[in-house]
Image (cartoon, rainbow, N blue to C red):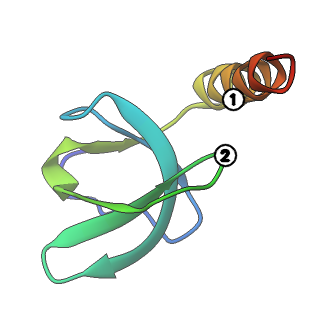
């Protein structure tokens, strides 16, 4: 819902970047998000961040597992 800032730890989609991650904190007007599989955080505009539903979260986690599996076979 617009105007609601997701809580720390929630899985979200940054629609401006088409990326998913977990909310790590809030800094000034931004939401700090880290990729689900770890990595570098980015600042997201709260207007472009929405909480993932269960189906979306499971799909994103599976995609991350598959990406890691492809990397380990190279």
For label 2, the crowd category at 10 Å Cα-Cα, with few meaning under 14, some 14 to 19 and many 20 or more, is some
Q: Is residue 23 above or below residue 18?
A: below
Please provide percent x and percent y for residue 69: 83, 22
| Badge 2 or badge 1: first in the primary sequence | 2
Q: Nearer the viewer, residue 4 or 15?
A: 15
- At 57% from the left and 31% from the top, the residue drawn is 53
**x 59%, y 65%: residue:** 9
- Do the CB atoms of the residues marked 2 and 1 lie less than 8 Å apart? yes
Q: Quadrant of residue 15?
A: top left
Q: Secondary structure at mark 2?
A: loop
Dividing the picture into quarters, in which one does residue 48 lie?
top left
Point out the image quarter for the C terminus: top right
Q: From the viewer's perspective, is 13 left or right of 63? A: left
- Whole-Å distance between the Cαs marked 2 and 1? 6 Å
- Disc 1 designates what residue? 64
Q: Quadrant of residue 56?
A: top right
Q: Residue at x 35, y 42 (%)?
A: 50
Depth check, front residue: 46 or 61: 61
Could you say which disc has been placed on residue 37 in the image?
A: 2
* Vertical arrangement, residue 73 with respect to residue 49, above or below: above
């Amino acid at each position: 819902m617009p105007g609601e800032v997701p809580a720390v730890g929630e899985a979200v989609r940054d629609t401006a970047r088409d990326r998913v991650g977990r909310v790590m904190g809030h800094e000034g007007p931004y939401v700090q998000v880290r990729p689900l599989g770890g990595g570098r955080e980015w600042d997201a505009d709260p207007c472009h961040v929405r909480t993932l539903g269960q189906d979306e979260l499971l799909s994103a986690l599976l995609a991350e597992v598959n990406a890691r599996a492809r990397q380990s076979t190279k």
